Image (tube, rainbow, N blue to C red):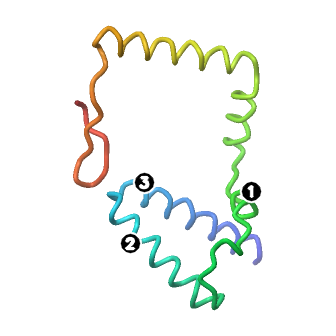
Amino acid sequence: MKEQAAAESSSQERQLVALLRKLPPERSAQVFAFARFVAYETFKTDELELFDVDEFLEDADTENDAKWEAIFASDEGQTALDRLADEALAEIHAGKAKPMIFTASGEITPG
């Protein structure tokens, strides 16, 4: 029962994050304001600093996150990142880069 509740909570968190990423910034701010309201009603405090953010983030880590962290921490990963950064800068300097344009819903569209 406890595992099922944890899995449901994790699923809801992923869905909420996916939804937030699609919202325009002003709508995300509204969601955040509502979350603060719910937190206040639940814990009777508006001091979000009292919450251990690292503790919540630890719960959100996935196996995939751990794999990416290992890649970024490796020498090969850093070399690959450096190469990608150099390629991106070369494209910018050559005038091949395009600006990022956002739709009304906050998604990126080709520029």
State the mark number for residue 30. Answer: 2
Q: Residue at x 32, y 8 (%)?
A: 94
Q: Tag 2's secondary structure?
A: helix
Position of residue 28 relative to residue 89, above or below, is: below
Which amino acid, by three-letter code, is at mark 3? Arg
The reply, left or right, for residue 77 in relation to residue 109 is right
The image shows residue 10 at horizontal and vertical percentages of: 63, 64
Residue at image point 42% right, 60% down: 19
Residue marked by disc 3:
21
Q: Where 110 sits versus 6, above or below?
A: above
Q: Within the image, what quadrant is residue 21 found in?
A: bottom left
The first of marks 1 and 2 along the sequence is 2
C-alpha separation, residue under disc 1 versus residue under disc 2: 25 Å
* Snapshot quadrant of residue 105: bottom left
Q: Which residue is mark 1?
A: 58
Residue shown at 76% from the left, 63% from the top: 55
